[in-house]
Image (tube, grey):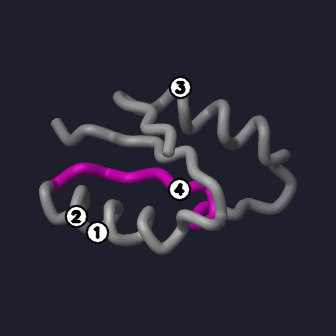
Amino acid sequence: MAYTVFISHSVRDLWFVSILKNWLESRGIHVYIAEEWLEAGIPLPKKIAKAIDGSDVVLAL
């Protein structure tokens, strides 16, 4: 079973988040970053809450 990590971050840290995401995914860990999952019609707070609930780990940067 693969782990899922939700990364909460500032837009200023997106460069680091990208590096961290690649590193985690190379080890078989699914990474959720809100900017990559844009869905029309779903409010951002609701989408984020759903992603957090479905994650094994929440990482705040």
The three-letter amino acid code for the residue at tag 2 is Trp
- Is residue 18 left or right of 24 when viewed as pictured? right
Q: Which of disc 4 and disc 1 is earlier in sequence?
A: 1
Q: Which of disc 4 and disc 2 is earlier in sequence?
A: 2
Residue at the spot of label 3: 53
| Residue drawn at 69 percent across, 63 percent down | 38
User: Of the numbered discs in the image, which one, if any, rests on residue 33?
Assistant: 4
Q: In which quadrant of the rendered image does the N terminus lie?
A: top left
Q: What stretch of residues is rendered in magenta?
A: 28-37
The three-letter amino acid code for the residue at tag 3 is Asp
Front one among 45 and 40: 45
User: Of the numbered discs in the image, which one, if any, rests on residue 23?
Assistant: 2
Q: Under tag 3, what secondary structure?
A: helix
Q: How far across and how far down the image is residue 44, in percent?
A: 79, 47
Q: Under tag 4, what secondary structure?
A: loop
| Residue drawn at 57 percent across, 51 percent down | 9
Q: Which of disc 2 and disc 3 is earlier in sequence?
A: 2
